[in-house]
Image (spheres, grey):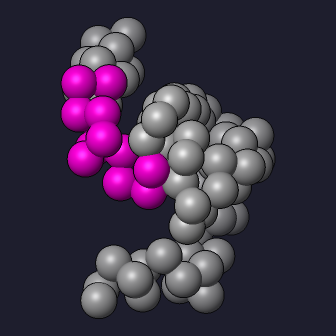
Amino acid sequence: MAMVGAADNRYTRDIVPALRQNATPKLLIWGEDDGFQKVEYAERFASEIPHTTLVRIPDAGHIPTDNAPGQIARALVDFFTA
């Protein structure tokens, strides 16, 4: 239930100004077939939040770690070793 609450934008909107000012690199991994949160949300986030890298995972849904764990692992390795 906590994850459901965290997904509600009423609980996450307040952090956006801080993210826009933060220079820490961010990695956003998103399933292209996410029926709950469309990939367009990820694209918007990545375009509006500086230092954000978006990795789109084809044929993955809302929890891409279930559908594509190898691709997730590769994205993490690439991000943290770049």
Q: Is residue 9 visible?
A: yes
Residue shown at the point (64%, 64%) measured from the top left: 16
Find residue 29 and report its horizontal and vertical position in percent.
45, 40
Quadrant of the snapshot with the N terminus: bottom left
Residue shown at the point (34%, 15%) measured from the top left: 78
- As displayed, is residue 75 above or below residue 26? above
Total marks drawn? 0
- Residue sticking out furthest to the top: 82
Residues 77 and 4: in front is 4
Residues 77 and 38: in front is 38
Q: Is residue 50 magenta?
A: no
Residues 17 and 40: in front is 40
Find residue 52 and report its horizontal and vertical position in percent.
58, 36
Quadrant of the snapshot with the C terminus: top left
Q: Is residue 69 magenta?
A: yes
Q: Is residue 61 left or right of residue 41?
A: left
Residue shown at the point (43%, 41%) measured from the top left: 60
Residue 54 picture quarter: top right
- As displayed, is residue 39 above or below residue 69? below
Q: Is residue 45 visible?
A: no
Q: Is residue 51 left or right of residue 77?
A: right
Find residue 24 and report its horizontal and vertical position in percent.
48, 38
- As displayed, is residue 32 above or below residue 56? below
Q: Is residue 47 left or right of residue 5?
A: right
Find residue 20 and report its horizontal and vertical position in percent.
68, 52
Residue 35 picture quarter: bottom right
Magenta region's main secondary structure? helix
Residue shown at the point (61%, 79%) measured from the top left: 9
The span picked out in magenta is 61-71
